[in-house]
Amino acid sequence: MKISQRLQQINSMISGHYDHIWDCCCDHGLLGMLLLERSAAHQVHFVDCVPSLMQALELRLQRFFPAEISGLNPNMAPHSDPDLNPDIDPDIDLQSNPEPNSNLYRHTQWQVHCLDVAALPLGQTSVQDKQLIIIAGVGGELLVDLVRAILVQHPQRHLEFILCPVHHNYYVRQSLTALGLGLKSEHLLEENQRFYEILHVSTIAAPNGLPITATGSLMWQTLDETSLPRAQRYLSQVIGHYQRMPTHKQIPEIIDAYQQQLALLLSEHGGA
């Protein structure tokens, strides 16, 4: 399957190494497979609530990322969904007693979870583990609900999120700020005549202490001659969207915020 620009961009925003990366609402698991190929984490988790999708994905993962020791399958962790792995004994420690000098840990391991993203089993990992949770391809309101649920259930953990809502970016940004998250990076992407904002945020603010702003900050600071017209079109499109709403539904402060962002962009680039 062709990897979308959106998934490729998310992949490129993941640097360093994590203990666990959770590819949520993963659909066919294409992003997680990219992460497996380059060993971006010790363990990549594929999470979705559609059983048929996850069963097909598990078969695909077994084919392309098989266990490396015959008779042992470290990819089938004891807490993988039993409905997807009916033949796996959950009491067996699949990672114990590897053969001497084996390549058991040479590649990233994976797990498939057929469950609601709000119920991620983070409690089964170490508090010290470095965690990245990716949620993309869902609406802004649902995305915020999922992030909030995860934070409420795991208030003491240091968590990072890469988030790509399909709409309601202003609401998402304000909500993430209210939840106390800090900005690490952000990117504006256009694909198939649709715009996407991708945010990398953390429960611990980035070293430069950047807040998450309602209309974006970092993604406007690296524009070149190619990306500037795209940014202007995006802001104009968002302003037009809010202005076309019925008068009783319009929110003047949102329109004003995007108009100010567009004016600032034009002034910084000589009115281009």
Image (cartoon, rainbow, N blue to C red):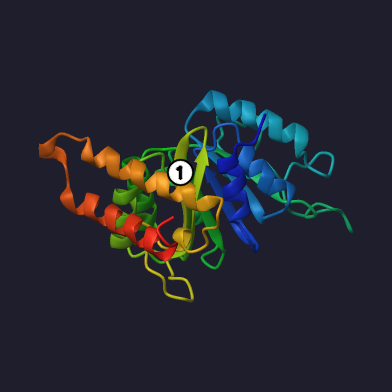
Q: In which quarter of the image is residue 156?
A: bottom left
Judged from this view, the residue extending furthest toward the right is: 101
Judge left or right: residue 225 versus residue 42. Answer: left
Residue in front for this viewpoint, 76 or 210: 210
Judged from this view, the residue extending furthest toward the top is: 52
Residue under numbered circle 1: 196
Percent x, y for residue 176? Answer: 34, 57
Q: Which amino acid does label 1 sit on?
A: Tyr
Asked if 181 appears above or below 168 in the picture, the reply is below
Residue in front for this viewpoint, 230 or 6: 230
Q: Quadrant of residue 204?
A: bottom left
Q: Which residue is drawn at 56% across and 50% down?
A: 226
Asked if residue 204 can be seen in this view, the reply is yes
Asked if 26 appears above or below 100 in the picture, the reply is above
Judged from this view, the residue extending furthest toward the left is: 248
Q: Residue at x 64, y 36 (%)?
A: 3
